[in-house]
Image: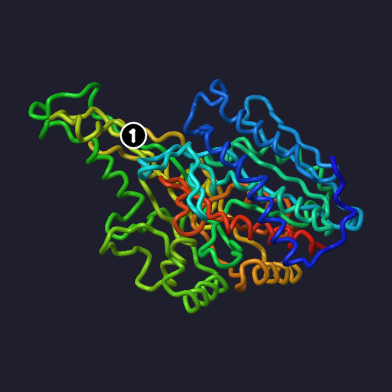
Amino acid sequence: MTSTREHTPTDAPLGLLAASEEYWESEALPVLSEYVRIPCLSPEFDAGWRERGEIARAAELLADWARARRIEGLEVEVVTAGDLTPVILCEAPATPGAADRAPTLLYGHLDKQPPLGAWRSGLGAFEPVREGDHLFGRGTADDGYSIFAALGAIETLERTGLDHGRCVVIIEASEESGSPHLGPYLEALAGRFGPAGPGLVACLDSGATTYDRLWFTTSLRGLVTATIGVRVLTEGIHSGTGGGVVPDSFRLLRALLSRIEDERTGEVLLSSCASDVPRLRRAEAEALVSELGEAVLEGIPSVPGLLRAGGKSLVDQLLARAWTASLAVVGIDGAPAVVDAGNVLRPYTTAKTAMRIPPGADSAEVAAELVATLTADPPEGAAVEVGDVVPANGFSAPDLAPWLARAGEEASLSYFGAPSRSLGEGGTIPFLSELSSSYPEAQFLVTGVLGPESNAHGPNEMLHVPTAKRLTASVAHILSKLL
């Protein structure tokens, strides 16, 4: 491997951004496009993931690419523990001038959501398509780009002769299932950081409210997923025979959901989900709305005339997305497609629900209250089953240390041309709650490329390529400033 450390530092803003732009076009995008073609669905969406081998294929593709990086002393391995999905583990030693700096842990994931609906003409979930600044395909922005940004940041530092401390990159493969396989790997990694743990955790799986600046994610909601099934018959019967005598399973399911959510307002009724918005986060939202106006909620493809939930003001809506509980029915079994629907009283209806919970809520307590509420006193004697309950805690970031706040501002101004900003996001990254509990002294850089129209989890997912380039340069700049 060719050494890059004899290079002399260039002008940092120009050098890092130019190196990142060249790196993405020549080194990253071709392999990211190959990754798009691999249907490496997360285990929740592919029970046969092990036999199909697509996750392993994606891991080997990315690991082989990583091994070819021009990073002095880089070690890359694909680690597998028992029947768990693999992780890619990359470790880059500190440059000679930064051996005393605290280590950094950089995180991303390679597992994907399913296609989830029809993509627009000319696009497909597993076929990469470049249209100007956009690269379309499942996993481009969530979160296939992350290994390219993480190792790209380190490589561009070495290309431009700038120092960095020891960096450990972990790319997992079960995040879209709630990261159930990550825990044992994190335990095994603990010894690599010493008793103090990493000085910086850089999570590259979050959002960007706009593409014109660097965004810090200050909080993420937790998540409790579950399936709720209601059965009224052993088999379907003619609706004329049973209708009026046998209660409809969908109606009973609807009644159960009303126990946990007010269908008029969307308010979640579980006491374990109650929360107060911290004063600092409200001030943060107010400042953003004052500066950016409607742009803070751009990119949601609402139908004309739809009324937003969460309150009348943009501030309340932003805070509702980040700090209040919400329920979504994300899947239904037991109901045929409309084109196939006969006049049949169906035997059962099963819904999969996703309940986002406030950052401070205990997901295990929420899960327990959810199950108890739904299974008590089954409506009209129906058979009710609640299963596949998966809790994941939210995350609230510690205040930024002065050095990180300063480095983030410098990076945003240098590579995006606008000041950095902070905001809570509505999604969930289970990794962060685990790490913040294990390493309470660590600083957290939680950021990403999921901006307007990136459409993670939905059809037409895309990566905004200029943002990936600028974000990579920004992460590099911050790594160079780590104390």
Q: How many marks?
A: 1
Q: Nearer the viewer, residue 373 or 157?
A: 157
For image coordinates 43% across by 34% down, the residue present is 387
Q: Nearer the viewer, residue 139 or 288?
A: 139
Q: Quadrant of the C terminus?
A: bottom right
Q: Position of residue 58 (x, y in %)?
A: 60, 33
| Mark 1 crowdedness (10 Å alpha carbons): few <14, some 14-19, many ≥20 | many
Does residue 201 appear to the left or right of 290 in the view shown? right
Q: Position of residue 164 (x, y in %)?
A: 82, 56
Does residue 47 appear to the left or right of 445 in the view shown? left
For image coordinates 71% across by 54% down, the residue present is 201
Q: Quadrant of the N terminus?
A: top right
Q: Quadrant of residue 27?
A: top right
For image coordinates 79% across by 64% down, the residue present is 481
Rendered view: 114 above or below 395: above
Q: Position of residue 236 (x, y in %)?
A: 20, 24
Q: Quadrant of residue 186?
A: top right
Give SS at disc 1. Answer: strand
Rendered view: 206 above or below 287: above
Kindly identify the amino acid type of the residue bearing the numbered disc 1: Gly
- In the image, farthest residue toward the left: 240
For image coordinates 66% across by 37% down, the residue present is 62
Q: Position of residue 127 (x, y in %)?
A: 48, 37
Instruction: Decide if residue 360 is in sight here.
Output: no
- In the image, farthest residue toward the bottom: 290
Instruction: Decide if residue 85 is in sight here.
Output: yes
**Disc 1 marks which residue?**
229
